[in-house]
Amino acid sequence: MMKKFILVVCGSLVGTILAFVLFMFLAMFLSMAIMSMGMVGGKKSVNVSKHSILKLDLGTEITERSGSEPLDMMSLLQGEGLPSGLGLNTAISAIQNAAKNDKVDGIYIECNGVSASPATLQALRRALKEFKKSGKWIAAYGYEGINQADYYIASVADSIYLNPVGAVDLHGLASVTPYMKKMINKIGVEMQVIRVGSFKSAVEPYMLDDMSEANRLQQEHYLGVLWKEMVDSIAADRKLQAAALNSLCDSVVVTFQPDELKKLKLVDKMAYINEMEDILRVRTEVDKDDDLNYVYPEDLAADLEEMVMGDHIAVVYAVGEIDGSASIMSPGEEGIDSEKLSETIRDLIKDDNVKGMVFRVNSPGGSAFGSEQIWKAVMDFKAAGKPVAVSMGDYAASGGYYISCCADRIFAERTTITGSIGIFGMIPCYENLVENKLGVHMASVKTNENGDMGVMGKKLTPAQLAALQNMINNGYELFTKRCADGRHVTQDSIKKIAEGRVWDGLTAKQIGLVDEFGGIREAVAWVAKKAKLGDDYKTQNYPTLEDQFMSMLDKYMVGRYEAHLQGEMGVLYDWHKQLQAILGRDHILCLMPDEKIRL
C-alpha cells in the first residue's frame, strides 16, 4: 500500500514538473511569436497600395478599445495573428482615415455574425455614413447569411450582396431574464432584498417568480425605442417604408428565398464568393487573376495607444462592472477597479499637459462605494479647472450614471442604455441549506444582540432589515443628490425619473439625463473647444493597457477554464454565473438589471 502511495505521489510530482516545463516553453514561444509579429512595442507599419479596399470582417466581437480583446490562442498558433476582436476605436479611426486616403477606393463589409450591442453598432454605422460623404463606395456581402446585427450595419452600403443559398434574418429585439427564486429556494437559499425604486429590477430574479409590471413597462419602452431607431435607419438607407419593414420582421424573414429577398429590396444582387471577389476587382481596377488589395482596420487606424508629447486631451476608459469580482466576469470581459481608476484620474489632474478629459463610460454599474470614489475623482478633475465630457457607450446605467452625472457635458448614442438611478442591497440567507439540507447546526455565542449579524448567511432580524433599509435609503438620497447637482436641477425632479428606471439614450436626452447625441469624437471636439486647444489637438488613451503578453495569457487560461465549465453545465452555466455574482459582489449596489438584449 505504501509503495503504491509513493508511486502515485512521484507520478503526480513528475506530471506537475512536466506541465510546468511545457507551460514555460509555451510562454517563451508565444512571447517570441508576438514580438515577431510586432504586437509588442508599437504598431506595425503597413504599406497601402493603390486601389486598396478596407475590409471590415463582422465575424468578431467589437470591444470598446483595441488591445483589450481576449487572446485567441489557437489562432495565434495557426499563424492567424491576434487579437481576435476589434476595438470600436480602431474601427472608427480606420474608417475616418480610409475616407481621406486616396489609395483606398472603398469599404467591403463581410457579414459573419458580429457580436456587439446596439449602441456600439450605431456608432460604427454612423462612421460608415460619414465615410460615404467622401464619394467612395461601400459594399456588403453575406456568405452564409446576414443576421440582424450585421444587416443594421450592412444597410448603409451602396449594395448588399448575398450568396444564392444564403438568408437574411430580421426578427426584432427581445430581452430575456431568468427568474431563479424557485431554484434557489429549493436548495435552501433565501435572498434578503432591500431596495429603493419600484423599477430597480436587478433584484427581481431572486425575489419574484416572474417579471413585475414596472419592469415589463420599462423594458417595453426602451426596447421599442431601440428597435424603432434601428428600423427607421435601415428603412431610410434601403428606401423602404418602416411600417412595411416591421411587418416583414413578423414573417420569419430567415425562411425567405433569395429571389424574394431581392424583390423586397432587402438585398441587391446574388453572388458566390468568387463572383463577389470579381465584382470587387472590377470596382478597384484589379486584373481578374490578381489578388485584391485588402487593408484592415488595424492597418489604417492611428496608433491610438502611442504616447503623445505636449498638450492633449485624456480619453479615460471605464468599461465593465465597477469593482466586480473576477469570478463573475466572462473571459476577456473588462472590469472597473474603482481605486485604480480614481488614481489614474488624479494623476491626470497633476499632469499639466492634460488640458481636459473625455470619460468614456460603458458600465452597468456595480459597487455603490466604488461609484462614489470615482465620482469624487471626476469632481476633483473639474475642480482643477479642466473640462470633462462623458461619452456613453452601450451602457452607462446605475453606477455607470453615478460616475457620469457630474460631467460638464454628457454625450450618448440614441441606443445607449442609461439611467437606472437606484440602489439596492442583496444578502443571501442559507440557514435552511446548512441546517436542513446539509445537516450542519451552527451554534453561536454573542455579546451583543447583533453580534452574529450576517455570519454564515444567518437570517436578518426585522430590526436589522430596518437598519439596512435606512442605509439604502440614505444611499439613494446621496445618489439622487449627486445627479441633481451634476445636472443642475432639483433633487425632486431627479427622483421623478429615477426609481431605478432604465432609459434609452433618446428618451434620456428628452428628460435631461443626456445633453447631446454622439460618441468619443464629438465629446473630444467639445472638450478641445472648452480647453481652447484649437483644431490641431491630440488625444491620449488611459489607463495604459496591461502588458500584452501576460494580460492575454491570463485571459486565455481563464477562458479555457470557463469554456470547459460552460461545456459541462450547458444551459445551467448562465445561472451558475448569476449565483456566483451574488456571492462575489458587494452587498450594496448601484447596478442595472442583467437583461440580455437579443439581437
Image: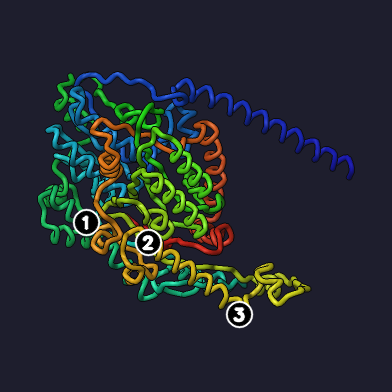
The amino acid beneath tag 1 is: Glu
Closest to the observer: 503 or 62? 503
Residue 443: x and y, percent?
77, 73
Q: Residue furthest bottom?
A: 462
Q: Of callouts 2 and 3, which one flags the residue occurring earlier in the amino acid sequence?
A: 3
The amino acid beneath tag 2 is: Cys
Closest to the observer: 37 or 114? 37
Residue 74: x and y, percent?
48, 33
Q: Of callouts 2 and 1, which one flags the residue occurring earlier in the amino acid sequence?
A: 1
In the rendered image, the quadrant that contains the N terminus is: top right
Q: Residues within 10 Å of mark 3 (few under 14, many from 20)?
A: few
Q: On residue 302, which mark appears?
A: none
* Residue that carries the numbered disc 1 in the rendered image: 229
The residues tagged by marks 2 and 3 sit, at their Cα atoms, a distance apart of: 31 Å
Residue 362: x and y, percent?
39, 50
Q: Of callouts 1 and 3, which one flags the residue occurring earlier in the amino acid sequence?
A: 1
Residue 238: x and y, percent?
13, 48
Whether residue 458 is visible here, answered yes or no, is: yes
The amino acid beneath tag 3 is: Ala
> Are dots 2 and 1 in contact, CB under 8 Å?
no
The kind of secondary structure element at disc 1 is helix
Q: Residue at x 61, y 76 (%)?
A: 464
* Residue that carries the numbered disc 2 in the rendered image: 483
The kind of secondary structure element at disc 3 is helix
Q: On residue 463, which mark appears?
A: 3
Closest to the observer: 160 or 501? 501
